[in-house]
Amino acid sequence: MKLSIIRSACGSLRMHPARPGSRVSGFTRRWQPVGPVSGRLVIRAASAASSGGTNPKVSVNFGKRSRKDDGFECDSSLSEVVQSTKEAMLALQRRHSTVQPLLAIVQAGEDDSLLEISKKISGRIGLNITQICLTKECSEDEIVEEVLKLNEDPRVHGVHLRLPPASLTSRVLNALKPEKDVDGISDLNMGRLVRGDLSKGFVPPRASAVLDLLEKLDAPLEGKTVLLVGGEGPFVVALQCLIERSGLVALKSHWSSKSLQSQVMQADAVVLLGAENMDVLPTWVRPGAAVIRCEPTLETDDHTIEMSSKSGLEYLTAAYRTRNVVRSCSRWLQAQQYQPWHLHCLKLQPLTPVPSDIEISRAQTPKPVNQLAEEIGLLPEELEAYGRSKAKVRLSLLDRLHKQPNGKYVLVAGITPTPLGEGKSTVTIGLVQALSAHLKLNSFACLRQPSQGPTFGVKGGAAGGGYAQVIPMEEFNLHLTGDIHAITAANNLVAAAIDARMLHEATQSDKALFNRLVPSVNGVRRFSPIQISRLHRLGINKIDPASLTPQEVSTFVRLDLDPSKITWQRVVDTNDRFLRKITVGQASTEKGQIRETGFDIAVASEIMAILALADSLEDMKTRLARMVVGTSRSGQPVSTEDLGVSGALVVLMKDAIKPTLMQTLEGTPVFVHAGPFANIAHGNSSVLADKLALKLVGRDGFVVTEAGFGADIGMEKFFNIKCRTSGLRPDVVVLVATVRALKMHGGGPNVSAGAPLSREYIDENLSLVAGGCRSNLRKQIQITHLFGVPVVVALNVFKTDTQAEIELVCQMAKECGASDAVPCHHWAQGGRGSLDLAHAVNQAASRPNNFQFLYNIEMPIVEKIRTIAKKVYGADDIELSPEAVAQIDYYTQQGYGSLPICMAKTHLSLSHMPDKKGVPTGFVLPIRDVRASIGAGFIYPLVGTMSTMPGLPTRPCFYDIDLDPVTEEITGLF
């Protein structure tokens, strides 16, 4: 007996019209919103035993019928699936009211029969459908291209490939994301089904429908035989697997089998697959047996759609497919929530003596970055891989986890360092290795990206050292993901725009400038958006270029930059002392526009400071636009937006704003992002890296970030500038000290980079150590207490330190006010060597703190400078040069008086005198000039002479750096 769909008395089934489709590249995309459907669906069927001997179409009994109040009448199996899916949909939408599951149907040709069936089912559930019609002759490439688009569309939760079998190639099937493969036909989902793991995969809906029909037969089939005739491919495999898992015996046969008749006569149920024109005679079927045909034809007339059992099966299949779409949507929403970490840490086998940093790094194989990302709860779409071991993380993570509580926030600072550095980066990495790999607490390190200047100069890299490193250290210390190169390009684009604009203004009339700045295109002259913004700032509220008066044209086109007051310099990421002062414009083509300028090192660019302080792409765009590059002859500030270049800067920086994910030697996560100078800028890694990490670690996790130089510089700026910008509040400060630096502050000989250490630094000397503790260490602890944050002293132990020296430092640090003080052996032992520090930090973070800023942001600029000088540096007072006084008055007049202060002074002393160690007293801090980074958002007073372009020493690091051309291994980096 055939199945029928009988239309209601009102005529044709009402469907919502598709939105007009546009044919692109050989296919039409049609979006089908689905609502309630009028009309009745009646499925009638009879068992094989009662169908008679003359009808070759033997059908299955689909069970009892049920009637809904809205007139939708259907078989009980279909009704149950639709109802349960509708309930799941309602439950999903109660939790997420704005989410609407969407099924995309990709097909060859424009046959709408499946779409009509899907719309009827989806209309009862509340599901949306979109149909993509490719040409019948579509190629594999075209199919894959469309599948990949659907993969990346977050609105699409399921994809059904209604394509000829020849088009369902392995490449096509496996191009589809398994989580959107609601037909369960990709290799991965099929493997999950065979293995019995359906927590992530899907059961093919047609197989579910057939199994449902078998289970609804009048006689129980447990232990009985189901014969599958014909068919190949994933569907047959899935069906056979499900039948056997249900306690039935599944046998397979082919239409050409000579024993087909006897096999059919012995089977309790027969499923006909594949050949559409093939059938079995009713006389072959034993009484009471069921026959299910999966591939019959469809016949229609003007009033009734007559269908064989296949059409009933199509509706049931469509119902199961919509169930899979709802499940896919539910899984997607679950994946959007915070995910617990499943961190697989890497094992360390420390050697004695400790090998070189690069040997240690190379001996450890880092995890693939996508594996690390999955372990810490990042979604695949949030990752942009740069090779195997590093990746950018998209800022959409902040939106996804915006309700997730932040973890604990730890700052690593230090006492006033020697020129050799005291190992803050190493302590930072050792601490997170101890927290995550050994205490099993989620933790993230957030580090600055190192400049290549020091890497090839004298200091070397900044990946940590020994068994506390970021790996691969070569990639960390060199180009990484190109952020510094992007900053260099953006900075130098501004410099080029400045000089070019001055040249054109000096050599053209107002009219010529206007015609070139606002060119006529196809007879129409229009202002660009950035030019309209400039007009508004000038008080000219016009958008028609022809309406400007001659005076308005002149005001608009002339920036009138004063060459002597241009503050913007070019940058390069190399220590090149001969670029500190240069002359540009000497070629004859520049028509006498000669001026003196110079280069800074790239990390001293204001764009780097902006990158570190921006909290979104929009915020970075705003900050880049308001950067002041100089002053006009009339005394007005000129910004990058006035130059018309700010939009291009955002384009150059759009990828740089994303933090880079890497890992430590023990496989714990690290964000590397931004690297501003700690003297003329704030010297901290990015706000965004910290915010992303604080969400990822969870409420009980730790984010450990580092401030440049000593606590008097990097930490003070971290609190007063970075924390004001981010709104974040630290829980603990880790203050790094070394016996070497304490001896220097206690009266030891001078320490110089590249020179051998004096005996005092190699032999035990408790009096020098005690002197350093009573002076510089005590002062730095006191500075920390000014901000109300508990401090833990981490003694970075060197192999020349004696046990007596170590114990003395820890004892005196506690006497000076530290919450705790512990020795750290991470350089030689990895995370295990920093377990005491990890315990101390965990304990200190659980205590309440009373964080406060050092000064009120609305205080006058002079008073903010005086507060830092007296309370942090210990100065008696400040002394302002006439130039500094004039600049302060100018910035106050321009409305910049409420910006925070970023002191630019030497890092080698608490005072402005690098050779004054310990705690200098009785000095007045000289302020020779005051400048502003308006885009970054701070005023920076210059204390003494500050170089923004380092030079190379007599024997730079590059003497030892080389590459093996055979193995491509780098040597000499440290």
Image (tube, rainbow, N blue to C red):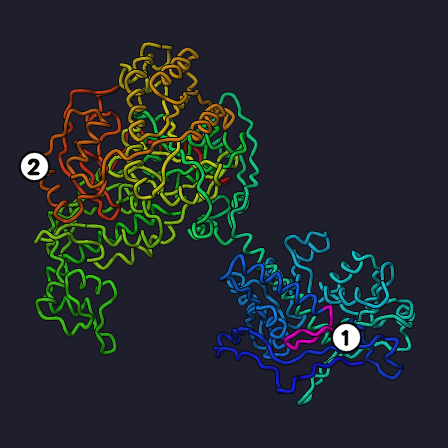
Disc marking residue 218 = none
Query: How far is disc 1 from disc 2 in space, using C-alphas?
Result: 96 Å
Residue 494 lies, with reference to residue 146, above or below; the image says: above
SS category of the residue bearing label 1: loop
Nearer the observer: mark 1 or 2; the answer is 2
Q: Picture quarter containing residue 180?
A: bottom right
Q: Mark 1 highlights which residue?
A: 275
Name the quarter where the N terminus is drawn: bottom right
Q: In which quarter of the image is residue 756?
A: top left
SS state under label 2: helix
Which amino acid, by three-letter code, is at mark 2? Pro
Residue nearest the observer in this picture, 746 or 403: 403
Percent x, y of residue 625:
25, 54
Q: Does the magenta stretch include residue 549?
A: no
In the rendered image, residue 754, in percent from the top left (x then y), is placed at 31, 24
Which residue is nearer to you in this view: 553 or 356?
553
Residue 882 got which mark? 2
- Which picture quadrant has residue 288? bottom right
* Left or right of 805 on screen, residue 300: right
Image point (22%, 57%), residue name: 641
348 shown above or below 279: above
Region in magenta: 65-77
Left or right? Give the position of 497 relative to 135.
left
Q: Which of marks 1 and 2 is nearer the N terminus?
A: 1
